[in-house]
Amino acid sequence: MNSLNVPAPKLTGRTERSPHDRQALEKPASPALPPLAEKISAVLAEHPYFRRRPPAVHAHEGRVVLQGEVATFYHKQVAQELTRKFDGVHAVENLLHVAW
């Protein structure tokens, strides 16, 4: 017993949580990309040239805008050509910046 003559709570390996506790632990939802932009972003993020810093992709009604920084002009062209091949892409605005 401690100095206040109150028994210490027993510690167990499990902690009980109420449903309200779980809500506080969940991450807030990020704004969802349109399906076309999401697909293109996923492919570019997996490509070896863009894994470190994938370009930002914005799409609206078949028009896709690529933004960000790439290492070479070749990488800029690769990103544009990969994007052009997706169904539903009518125009690509390539605003990628080449960092020397």
Image: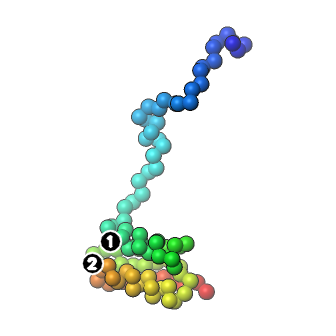
Residue 88 tag number: 2
Image position, residue 68 (x, y; %) = 50, 77
Q: Nearer the viewer, residue 65 or 43?
A: 43
Quarter holding the N terminus is: top right
Q: CA distance from mark 2 to mark 1?
A: 8 Å
Q: Amino acid type of disc 2? A: Gly
Residue 63 seen from this side? no
Q: Amino acid at mark 1?
A: Leu
Residue 61 found in image quarter: bottom left
Q: Earlier in the sequence, mark 2 or mark 1?
A: 1
Tell me the colour scheme of the image.
rainbow
List x then y, in percent, for residue 24: 47, 41
Question: Neighbour class for label 2 at 10 Å: few (<14), some, many (≥20)?
Answer: few
Query: At 59% across and 25% down in the image, what residue appears?
Result: 11
Residue to which mark 1 is pinned: 36
Q: Which residue lies at the image location 45% right of the left edge and 85% below the top edge?
A: 78
Q: Is residue 72 left or right of residue 20?
A: right
Q: On screen, 31 above or below 51?
A: above
Query: Neighbour class for label 1 at 10 Å: few (<14), some, many (≥20)?
Result: many
Determine whether the residue tagged by mark 2 lies in a helix, strand or loop: loop
Q: Is residue 45 above or below residue 73?
A: above
Q: Residue furthest top?
A: 5
Q: Please report the residue visible at 36 percent of the width from the left and 70 percent of the height from the top.
A: 39
Out of 36 and 12, give the one closest to the viewer: 12
Residue at image coords 41%, 34%: 19
Measured from the top left, where is residue 96 in percent x and y? 48, 82
Judging depth in this view, the residue of 29 and 85 nearest the camera is: 85
State whether residue 45 is above or below residue 29.
below
Query: Camera-side residue: 66 or 41?
Result: 41
Do labels 2 and 1 touch, CB within 8 Å? yes
Which quadrant does the C terminus fall into? bottom right
